[in-house]
Image: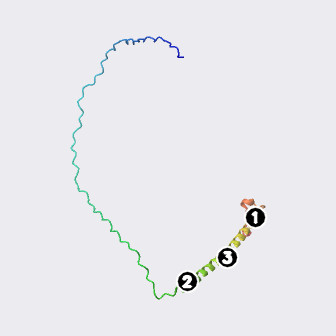
Amino acid sequence: PAPPKVDIPKPAATEFKIPDAPKFDLPKIDALKMPDMKAFSLPKVDIPAMPKFDTPKFDMPSAPAVPKISAPAAPKIDENLEPQEVRDARAAEKNAAFKNAQAEVKEAEKIANVAKNKAQALKKEAKQAKGEACVTRPGGKILCLRGLGIGY
């Protein structure tokens, strides 16, 4: 079934007029009149013309010539050289001597480290013994006032 038709009356367009704003006159005020002043003129001063001089000219150097790069010449081999095997053997011998010297240096460093550690341990013991000796001295451990020639 079709829905029933319902007629709704349209409201009449209402007219709204903006009321005229009330009119009023402002009183006329004569503004202060500025006295007529002639244009202010500066006194004329003769300024001398700037002296003319020529700016110095500098000669710009030309760009340096680009050097030509060529491949290095092959090294000349002396024909009086010893055979390759002899030179290789000499290089191996020198390398072995270097390795032996390097091993001796490592051994000496180990011995030096042992001696250094021993000296540090003795230093700690001496410091502790000095602290114990200074306990009864005037000033205690901090100042430790003692006579000359005591030995610590």
Residue found at x 72% / y 60% = 143
What x and y, as percent, mark residue 137?
76, 62
Depicted 41 relative to depicted 62: above or below: above
For residue 99, what is the image quadrant? Answer: bottom right
Mark 3: amino acid: Glu
Q: Mark 3–mark 1 contact, CB under 8 Å?
A: no
In primary-sequence order, the first of circles 3 and 2 is 2
Question: Mark 3 sits on what residue?
Answer: 107
For residue 60, what is the image quadrant? Answer: bottom left
How many numbered marks are there? 3
What x and y, as percent, mark residue 116?
69, 71
Foreground disc of the pair 2, 1: 2
Question: Mark 1 sits on what residue?
Answer: 128
Query: Can residue 152 be seen here?
Result: no
**Mark 1: secondary structure:** helix
Q: Nearer the viewer, residue 37 or 147?
A: 37
Foreground disc of the pair 3, 2: 2
Rendered image: mark on residue 57 = none
What is the distance, in whole Å, between disc 3 and disc 1 at their CAs?
32 Å
What is the distance, in whole Å, between disc 3 and disc 2 at their CAs?
29 Å
What x and y, as percent, mark residue 110?
68, 73
Q: Mark 2–mark 1 contact, CB under 8 Å?
A: no
For residue 112, what is the image quadrant? Answer: bottom right
What is the distance, in whole Å, between disc 2 and disc 1 at their CAs?
60 Å
Question: Mark 2 sits on what residue?
Answer: 88
Mark 1: amino acid: Gln
Crowding at mark 1 (Cα within 10 Å: few <14, some 14-19, many 20+) = few
**Mark 2: secondary structure:** helix
Q: Residue furthest bottom?
A: 80
